[in-house]
Image (cartoon, rainbow, N blue to C red):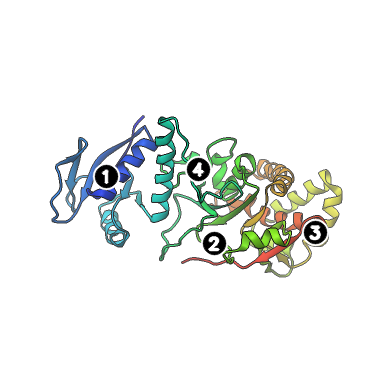
Amino acid sequence: MERNIYIVGAHSRARTLGVYLTKIYPDMKIEAYLYDNDESNAADIEGVPVVRFDQDTSLHTQYPVYLGTRGVYHPVLTEKLKQMGMEKIIPVTPQLDMELRNRFLTLYFAEMGRSYDKFDDISESACIYVVRSVLDKPLQGEYQLSVFQKEIQVGAALTEDRICSLTDDTGENISGRNCQFCELTALYWIWKNAKQNIVGLEHYRRHFLLKNDWYQKMKENDIDVILPAPLYVAPSIAQNYKDRHTASDWDFMMDYLNRIYPEDYRKAVDFFDTNLYSPCNMFIMKKEILDELCKWLFPILFVCAEHSREREDPYQNRYPGFLAERLMTFFFEKNRNQYKVAYADKNFLQ
């Protein structure tokens, strides 16, 4: 089944984008290249029509639109396309362009029987996966990813739209449960599929505030785990959860801990009566430690989700993610003599 798209632009950037996309996604068909100025353009590009558009142009509003122009034009184009009723607009940022280019080159070289080896590719050693979703709201400013960061689209099994070259619906995954498990579908994917020695998880709006040499410092100081600076909540971690979310979910989780991990339960009761936990399910840690965390964490969350099932409120339906924030903090508290944990501040992008 073909996936039809539009590309805004009819010059070099847009043409290159068209080559990247159709190579990476063989089932993708470019319906038309669009432009809205007085520049002279060819009638078609490789048989695909080049069409001038305005408010009266009839377009398929459900088709994704890729903005293959300079970034300075993206805000005006986005607003114009929204007014025309276009439902999915994808600005091709420098980061997305880089991801598509590298993915294209990997396929291109493979067809020649060669590997595409990059001198500066350090993703074999460490990678911080940055969670993206088709539901993300646009950022007011552009965020430049570091060489250690790579975006991953979560909930990819629930949509045909693609905003990242890496998606959480490949390999062993729980992508289809993203409405409940939110960024944890990326965590599960990292656990089951990532190969780096050090892995991390951030959000498109929330990133750790780290110096450029964090990777070297982490190794030099034998740091096992980096977590967000803890958040103080009152009157306690447990009661704060009950006040903000569904209390019965918390009670069931604690009862399950008592039945399955009685030693953990006794420690958890004391810990959750305190006031500090690391929010957002963000981290950077050694992969073998992440494996141990996930082996302990996900069985608990799956049982809780099976018990409480779906919630009508989209926010409260994300309770597995909210429980995970507290459970992850507790995991490192109960293992504080085993792992060296450091904390880092995080930003929040508008």
Q: Image check: 332 left or right of 308?
A: right
Q: Amino acid at mark 1?
A: Arg
- Residue 206: mark: 2
Asked if the residues shown at circle 1 and circle 3 are in contact, with their CB atoms under 8 angstroms apart, the answer is no
Measuring 34% from the left and 51% from the top, which residue is drawn there? Answer: 89
Residue bearing mark 1: 15
Q: Image check: 281 left or right of 251?
A: left
Q: Amino acid at mark 3?
A: Arg
Up-down relation of residue 214 to residue 28 (above or below): below
Q: Image check: 105 left or right of 189?
A: left
Asked if the residues shown at circle 2 and circle 1 are in contact, with their CB atoms under 8 angstroms apart, the answer is no
Q: Quadrant of residue 243?
A: bottom right
Q: CA distance from mark 4 to mark 2?
A: 19 Å
Residue bearing mark 4: 167
Residue bearing mark 3: 336
- Residue 214: mark: none
Residue 303: x %, y % from top left:
70, 42
Whichever of labels 3 and 4 marks the residue nearer the N terminus, that label is 4
Q: Secondary structure at mark 1?
A: helix
Q: CA distance from mark 2 to mark 1?
A: 33 Å
Whichever of labels 3 and 2 marks the residue nearer the N terminus, that label is 2
> Is residue 337 visible in the rendered structure shown here?
yes
Q: CA distance from mark 1 to mark 4?
A: 24 Å
